[in-house]
Image: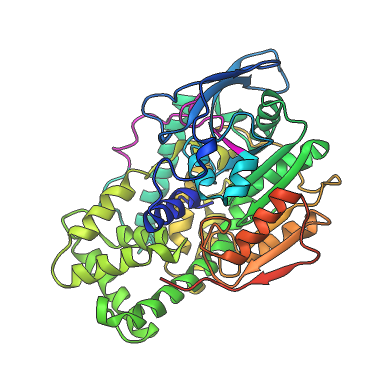
Amino acid sequence: MTRRPSPLARRGAAVAAALGLVALAGPQAAHAAPAATVTGPAALHWSTCPAGSEAPRGTYCATLEVPLDYARPNGRQIKLTLSMVGALNAPHTLVVNPGGPGEPGIGAPKLVWSSMPENVASAYNVVSFDPRGVGAGTPVSCGDTSKLIKHPAAPYTPANAAQEQARSTVARKIAEQCSAHAKDLLPYITTANAARDMDRIRTALHRDKLDYLGYSYGTRLGATYATLFPARTGRMILDSVVDPTVTTYGSQYEQNPALQHRAGQFFAWAAKKDATYHLGTTQAKVAATWDAVRAKLAAHPAGGRAGSAELDDLLASAMYTDLFWSDPAQAVSDYRRGDASTLLGATDQLALGDVDPARLAYNCVDDAWPRDWATWHRDTAAAAPKAPLFAWQNTWFSAPCAYWKAPTAKPVKIGSVKVPPILLLQAKDDPATPVVGAQRMQKALSGSRLLVSGGGNHGQYLFDGNACMDRAGSRYLLTGKLPAANGTCPAPSAP
């Protein structure tokens, strides 16, 4: 997957702000999960969360040790940090993954639990975790990479061979630096091992089956768990579904045209709001304005650090949800009026995620990647005409995988065994996980049901304001009953 903020984090922040959710929102009875111990194998002691973690107030944390290498279960152990919100004695536990890969999960339970309808929140406590290699557990580090990526960055689409070589050299240096700092961890930071970790979590929680909600990459993690542990799979919702039939390298080329299509929808939205943003009165005019601003920033970066690549980053980060379309529209509108502060603020914030060690660790080891840069060049050049704003950008986000030092893992074929039926939720125009992936996941998971909303927002259940999708998800969690057939839901209104 491309480097983007977690859909759960970005969507939830917007929903929380819009609805006025605060730390103590939700059913009063389940607020205080006091520090307590769940006894038995791999006992969990729930207490305060680590200092500096992303856990909001009302979240409790525990640690669990799991094998670094499941082929040697009694060998080196690594630490996972778990988090929980809700009543300790709730009838059910919902384990959540917010996406990624490599996204911390400590903050997810509060966000999910406080967004649930009261009857669902009373039936479930919500647990998440920082996966192996991430955050407050045993994290992967690539050391200080700040000197490798400068801003303004060169335009994503290389103007010549020298520019392309310069970027590929940076990708190689990132891979080398990650290996130097985390060589002992990298071969074991895989989705299959994270799924095995989830079964250890299930055991520690004393649940016979794992009830699970996974967003985006979390759908790959959930489907992998269901394939490895079908008899232990309970009620499972996969939301914004990853294509199980292509490698992560291949998924980039599914994303590119979907992102370009979504950008067209954003331009059309901005055209309807020309009185606010003054970017043009038609989709074509807004697109032309955008291209002109990109060219100007490429020639004369704003504030000496925001060029065309930084504008492209801002656009890409907003494509996951229309709740954030105002961000790039306002930034460009202000810039055209002579005020670059909004654009520069966004540039500085996005620059904090220039290198994401955990995301690279999962992506680069989960699948085989072309090691010949000529293949990357050929495939990206072929994709660029249909996705000029995103093809090369997507490639550079993943380019360190061309030089990764750890061996790739043996892939788990999703659905290679009989898996219990699962609920799949998907938006028709989702640019990060295109709808074809959800359709292929349903074929792989026989008996599952797929609901498709008419919108394009990434992350449906609880965070899109879509009553139709929310009802289906909540009904399934409460009853375990899937819809009788596949279905559709209308899109919520655009902001």
Q: Residue furthest front?
A: 29
Q: Please say whether residue 141 is one of the residues in the magenta stretch.
A: yes
Examine the rendering and report whether any part of residue 332 can be seen. Answer: yes
Q: Position of residue 154 (x, y in %)?
A: 31, 56
Q: Is residue 221 above or below residue 458?
A: above
Residue furthest to the right: 418
Residue at 71 percent of width and 42 percent of height: 224
User: Which stretch appears magenta?
Assistant: 125-148
Quick check: can you spot residue 246? Answer: no
Q: From the viewer's side, name the closer residue of 52 and 318.
A: 52
Residue 454 horizontal/vertical position (percent): 59, 73
Front residue of this view, candidates 271 and 63: 63
- Residue sitting at 32 percent across and 79 percent down? 273
The quadrant in which residue 208 appears is top right
Image coordinates for residue 232, horizontal then vertical, percent: 79, 36
Dominant secondary-structure state across the stretch colored magenta: loop
